[in-house]
Image (cartoon, coloured by chain):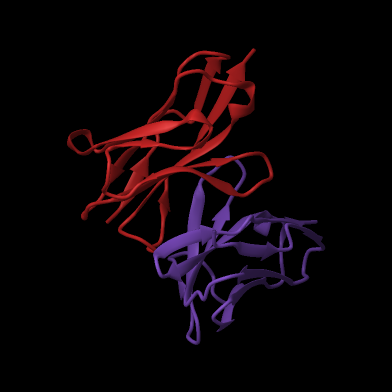
Chain colours: A red, B purple
Amino acid sequence: AQSVTQLGSHVSVSEGALVLLRCNYSSSVPPYLFWYVQYPNQGLQLLLKYTSAATLVKGINGFEAEFKKSETSFHLTKPSAHMSDAAEYFCAVSEGPGNQFYFGTGTSLTVIP
Amino acid sequence: GAVVSQHPSRVICKSGTSVKIECRSLDFQATTMFWYRQFPKQSLMLMATSNEGSKATYEQGVEKDKFLINHASLTLSTLTVTSAHPEDSSFYICSARANAPKKLFFGSGTQLSVL
């Protein structure tokens, strides 16, 4: 069985501050892990993904995430927040390429000027 | 990269009417497509798995007679919300599975508002 827990449904950071969005997963097989961003009234945009290669994954818009098997975590970070980063972020897990996704409940990121 | 087209992006309908949402894989064949639903401020929940040429597999709690899924070709799956009610108002997203390499691609979503 697969599941994802995102701690913190709302996160606020000041512009220029570090962004840290938490994701913990549960999986009975080696997981594939994803972070998606969703802007208001829009679809999902893939930020980055982990597919059993390098544990530190770099994505678009300056985001990165580190897969830590011992902690069953895949936290998303960005060194310096921009106003344009304000959005909803979803962590997702799947069993392998092309398998269905299981999404976390999402974290709403607010960036304060 | 592979593209999945979902149409319409936004639809407003009257209560009691039916709405059809299309999900097309534009440059690959998708034997499997997934339909998700997202309520405001909530996560995406899998509704059903659509397999080309066979009946869809619905998740627990999803009414198959209300949410009709047809996957008649390798590039098209449709979700029809029958006799829509205001509580069906939601954001619906499809994803299509490419086989070579195996990967999921998401549509851009459909915002359904039932008045």
Q: Looking at the image, is B92 positioned above or below residue A76? A: below
* Vertical arrangement, residue A10 with respect to residue A105, above or below: above
Location of the C terminus of chain B by quadrant is bottom right
Q: Residue furthest front?
A: B1
Q: Is residue A46 above or below residue A17?
A: below
Could you tell me if residue A105 is visible in this image? no
Rendered location of residue A27, percent (x, y): 25, 50
Q: Tell me if B80 is positioned left or right of A103 in this view.
A: right
Query: In percent of the image, x 66 and y 63: which residue is there?
Result: B6
Q: Quadrant of residue B18?
A: bottom right
| Residue under the image location 27 percent in, 41 percent down | A54
**B114 or B80, which is in the foreground?**
B80
Q: Residue at horizontal 35%, vertical 61%?
A: A97
Q: Is residue A31 above or below residue A6?
A: below
- The answer to whether B65 appears left or right of A90 in the picture is right
Q: Residue at x 51, y 60 (%)?
A: B105
Residue A49 at what x, y percent from top left? 39, 45
- Which quadrant holds residue A29? bottom left
Image location of residue A82, percent across then percent down: 59, 21
Q: Position of residue A51 (x, y in %)?
A: 31, 50
The answer to whether residue A34 shows anywhere in this view is yes
Of residue B42 and residue A99, the one placed in the foreground of this image is A99
Q: In the displayed structure, does residue A10 sit left or right of residue A71?
A: right
The residue furthest left is: A70
User: Quick check: B6 left or right of B75?
Assistant: right
Foreground of the two, B69 or A57: A57
* Image quadrant assignment for residue B112: bottom right
Q: Nearer the viewer, residue A80 or A44?
A: A80
